[in-house]
Amino acid sequence: MRIKVTFLVILVNTALTSSLLTPAQLPEDATLNYSQLGVKYGHKVEEHTVVTEDGYILTVFRMPGKKKTPVFLMHGTGDTSDCYIIRGNKSLAISLANEGYDVWAGNGRGNYYSRRHVKLNPDTDPSYWNFSFHDRGYYDLPAMIDYILQATGEKSLQSIGFSQGTTNHFVLLSSKPEYNNKLKVFIALAPIAYLHNLIPPVSIIGEIGPILNQLIPSNVNRILDIKSFERSIIEIVCTQEAISDLFCVTLGVLPASGFDPKRLESSFLPTLFSHFPAVFSRKDLIHHNQLILNKRFMNYDYGPEENMKRYGFVVPPEYDLRKVTAKIAMFFGNSDNLSRPRDVEYLRTLLPNVIEHHLMKEKEWSHFDFIYGNDMPETLFPYIFPILEKYS
Ligand SMILES: *[C@@H]1O[C@H](CO)[C@@H](O)[C@H](O)[C@H]1NC(C)=O
Ligand SMILES: *[C@@H]1O[C@H](CO)[C@@H](O)[C@H](O)[C@H]1NC(C)=O
Ligand SMILES: *[C@@H]1O[C@H](CO)[C@@H](O)[C@H](O)[C@H]1NC(C)=O
Ligand SMILES: *[C@@H]1O[C@H](CO)[C@@H](O)[C@H](O)[C@H]1NC(C)=O
């Protein structure tokens, strides 16, 4: 603890005494939330509250549009709805709203917009953080989808997910197949279900995951939560344009997933790292690790005894992708080190209703280019909009 505090003090001192950007000098978009960004880029934004069956209180943002069919956006792990808007005029949310779509952006349990519960206190109840991508798919998505359908009086909507936002959909559509009929089409950007073909460094993290898990104290149930030490480091260090290139991009999380400085230019990084990453629950990381090590897209492994009680099997059952009958359009990139093309191809062979699978033409297209890339309006949206038009 003392080491941590000392480190923080040094950083703060450095920030104050050198020419580093202070919060007041950050780009405006680094300091605005979803609603404020929506307004800045020309749209009215509504904030809706959705309560899940198991008591989590979620925030869903809406930019109303004149088209009838709602479009629902679901973010990835460690992220929020902000991923779809911080690119401003070049973002998916704003581009959709400009075209008259009724845009709804969801927020999974735990992130800074959805950090509430009817009974549990996220600060003091460890069981609040007892969730993985399974729960965001099994509880959060259906609650948000049903809410949107009820609010609009529509029978079905169009859905777009990125990364774990797609995993959440695969969990939902296989576990509660009645939701297939509530989606006119599901657009999966950088889809993730199988993690068989990971390469270093991500695959190494997968291999050492169980050891890390042993080393980390059992009371640590989340990382990068608001006001956490590690979050404050990112806010201080990574929002500095000059050093975030080296420290946060070259050494950090982005290259691990394939990072292309052409599409994520330095001047965007202060805005990016003011919004991202948001919280990861420990159970979510463990569940991912189980997928990597077992090479199966399966329910959480509680150990043989608890598995037997919960699932009736010693080994956790796989999610049955044959039940995912909704129309699916998949987009994936050649240099994406998380959603690997070979894993996406394998996933495609198991899904019964893939209407389009599109390998991005750009050779160096990587994971975050689907939500943060500066050329999305030219490279990606011209493929997304016709699909939304066709299946409206
Ligand atoms: C966004 O910021 C505005 C202005 O500070 C605030 O009124 C609003 O509650 C915020 N919205 C959310 C969801 O945090
Ligand atoms: C966004 O684009 C619109 C239309 O081109 C323009 O009028 C507006 O000024 C832009 N907004 C910002 C904040 O750059
Ligand atoms: C998390 O949930 C599992 C399964 O319901 C339970 O066995 C475990 O005790 C829970 N842990 C916490 C911290 O709530
Ligand atoms: C991501 O994958 C690309 C393509 O395989 C590779 O060139 C790049 O080095 C990888 N990035 C990292 C940090 O491993």
Image (tube, helix red, strand yellow):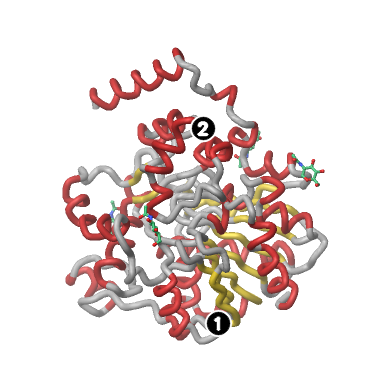
Q: Position of residue 158 (x, y in %)?
A: 66, 70
Residue type, numbered disc 1? Val
Nearer to us in this view, 270 or 74? 270
User: In this picture, is 249 found above or below 205?
Assistant: above
The residue labelled by disc 1 is 354
Disc 1 to disc 2, C-alpha distance? 41 Å
Residue 13 shown left or right of residue 189 in the figure: left
* Label 1: element kind: strand
The answer to whether residue 381 shows anywhere in this view is: yes
Crowding near pointer 2: few (<14 within 10 Å), some, many (20+)? some
Residue type, numbered disc 2? Glu
Residue at the (49%, 59%) spot, across then down? 366
Q: Which mark is residue 241?
A: 2
Residue at the (37%, 72%) spot, across then down? 194
Q: Position of residue 115 (x, y in %)?
A: 48, 45
User: In this picture, is 124 found above or below 291?
Assistant: above
The answer to whether residue 179 shows anywhere in this view is: no
